[in-house]
Amino acid sequence: MKFGVVVFPGSNCDVDVYHVIKNVLKKPVEYIWHRDQEIDGFNCIILPGGFSYGDYLRSGAIARFSPVMKSVEKFASQGGLVLGICNGFQILLEAGLLPGALRGNDSQQFICDDTFIKVENESCPFTIDCAQDEVLKIPIAHKDGNYFAEASLLRELEAKGQVVFRYCDHEGRVSREANPNGSVGNVAGVCNESGNILGMMPHPERCAEELLGGEDGKKIFKSVLKWWEKRGGRRGS
């Protein structure tokens, strides 16, 4: 299985993701420049965190129009796996590949801290190495991570299992106190209806080695590998 990590002007977590794939998981990985339009040969595309195009206009609003995104959209429509982390999540929302929107944190402050997230859907390609309701400790680092969806859309996402992660406390209790940014329903990550596109605000690449204080984030990447192996190297659901 081969991973591709998209690099936008302002990306700053691309090297972290590359390191986890190449040196921790020992899998093939290449960088994809934002101007590239040929992305054949990859099985999972990752949009990393950072401040693409300086977060001008809105976070992810300009990166959404990068030439590579047309190829990413086509790749996803054919069943390819796409993971957007933090700014990558913002880009996927701006591109309309995921439902909802991200607003400024309710504190209006940049937050860099460890958080706990609860696995709400253990059957998507990015969580099958996790257990239902498992609590993961994964850090966040963002100012615009306040997920928003109208009440009717949120109910639909919940009914279809598209809410993949929620912020919680260390015992898995979902509460206002455990919500770091004001996200509606404590939502920390969502997927598309087919499940092959996931956006999440927490940074799994920053906690994939015990050297960094924990390995919970590695479960996200190992899930991708497990999903791929179960399907014999085929795209699609």
Image (tube, grey):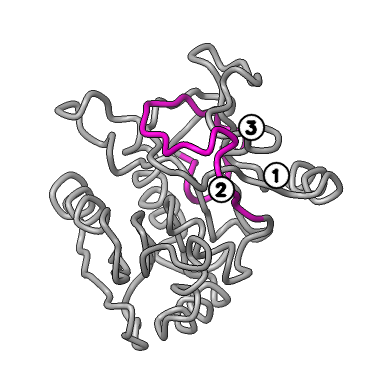
- Marks 2 and 3: in contact by CB < 8 Å? no
Question: Where residue 15 sits: x, y (%)?
Answer: 19, 56
Question: Where residue 205 sits: x, y (%)?
Answer: 29, 44
Secondary structure of the residue carrying numbered label 3: helix
Residue 193 lies in what quarter of the image? bottom right
Q: Nearer the viewer, mark 3 or mark 1?
A: 3
Is 110 magenta? The answer is yes
Is 31 magenta? The answer is no
Secondary structure of the residue carrying numbered label 1: loop
160 with respect to 17 (left or right): right
- The residue labelled by disc 1 is 161
Please give the label number shown on residue 124.
2
Residue type marked 3: Asn
Q: What stretch is highlighted in magenta?
A: 101-128
- Marks 2 and 1: in contact by CB < 8 Å? yes
Distance from Cα at disc 3 to Cα at disc 2: 19 Å
Circle 1 residues within 10 Å: few <14, some 14–19, many ≥20:
some
Distance from Cα at disc 3 to Cα at disc 1: 15 Å
Circle 2 residues within 10 Å: few <14, some 14–19, many ≥20:
many
